[in-house]
Amino acid sequence: MNEKLKNLMVRTLSGAILAVVVLGAIAWSQWSFGVLLALLLVVGMTEFYTLAEAQGAAPQRLIGLMAGLVLLALNFAFVSDDIEILGRANRVFSGGLAFMLLLLPVMFICELFRRRENPVANIAATLLGVVYVALPFSLMCYFPIIASEVWSPAVMIFYIFIIWANDVFAYLVGMSIGRHRLCERLSPKKSWEGFFGGVIGAVAMGLVAARVLDGGSAAWAGLALVASITGVLGDLVESMFKRAAGVKDSGRLIPGHGGVLDRFDAMLLSAPFVFVYMLYVM
């Protein structure tokens, strides 16, 4: 079998399995969605800290992962109906917040005893892992409820569809007519033609979401526009990190695709912008 064909088959199969797992977890329940976010957070932060170590930093992996998971748990507890019903929301939130606040000074204390050459870079890399990976995944807890005030997994699913539509249309248009490089220093294959093709595809998917969910066409088109533009920038940001680390992929978890950061890089940067957009527009 031709090597390229074999790689394409592996990439297609693993991509299909990933799509089923992700969409299934979102659609099944709030708890399966929360578990999915936690798993993606742990793997994504681990990959990021590996990239940071390749650049000479020595992040505090355990404390960073603990802070990321607590941040996710706090936001999940805030939106979860089940925790509210059990009457534990206030205790969970206040306890988690106290723990989160204590982790920050503990990070500085731990660095005292590690005796590493560059403590500033180590602490900065640890915190950046929380901001770059844990914060966006934590904000996604709100996507299924922020636009409708009730649990609606379709909103999160269509957000993912918008990101995917942007990727597919950008690839097809870029391969067909792409001539002008978008950011050759970081991603030589990306073109301005592909960029605008991706934006059009994303907006089209946003209009489909508005029709299916009986929402405002202008609001969903605007969301798709925000997600598309910031998603492309998210892809470039991750390429910047990988290029600085001297690696092609952030990990090997997904055959033919790389790691979690490689597959969710667009969502990591777009999620905060989409969250703010949903909060004030939708």
Image (tube, helix red, strand yellow):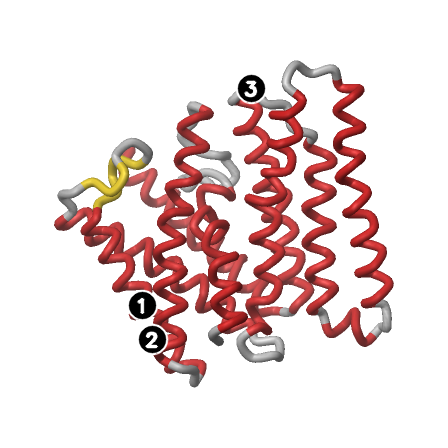
Q: Is residue 171 left or right of residue 69?
A: left
The residue positioned 69% from the left and 40% from the top of the image is 65
Question: Could you tell which of marks 3 and 1 lies nearer the N-terminus?
Answer: 3
Say which of marks 3 and 2 sits in front.
3
Report helix, strand or loop for mark 3: loop
Report helix, strand or loop for mark 1: helix
In this rendered view, identify the residue nearer to me: 187 or 153: 187
As drawn, 253 above or below 158: above
Image marks 2 and 1: residues in contact by CB distance under 8 Å: yes
- The Cα–Cα distance between marks 3 and 1, rounded to whole angstroms, is 41 Å
Q: Is residue 2 visible?
A: no
Horizontal and vertical percent position of residue 43: 60, 41
Q: Amino acid at mark 2?
A: Leu
Query: Residue 226's quadrant in the figure?
Result: bottom left
Horizontal and vertical percent position of residue 153: 55, 71
Report helix, strand or loop for mark 2: helix
The residue positioned 40% from the left and 53% from the top of the image is 230
Q: Badge 2 is on which residue? A: 207
Label annotation for residue 56: 3
Q: Amino acid at mark 3?
A: Gly
As drawn, 269 above or below 140: above
- The Cα–Cα distance between marks 2 and 1, rounded to whole angstroms, is 6 Å
Q: Badge 1 is on which residue? A: 203
The residue positioned 73% from the left and 34% from the top of the image is 62
Query: Residue 242's quadrant in the figure?
Result: top left
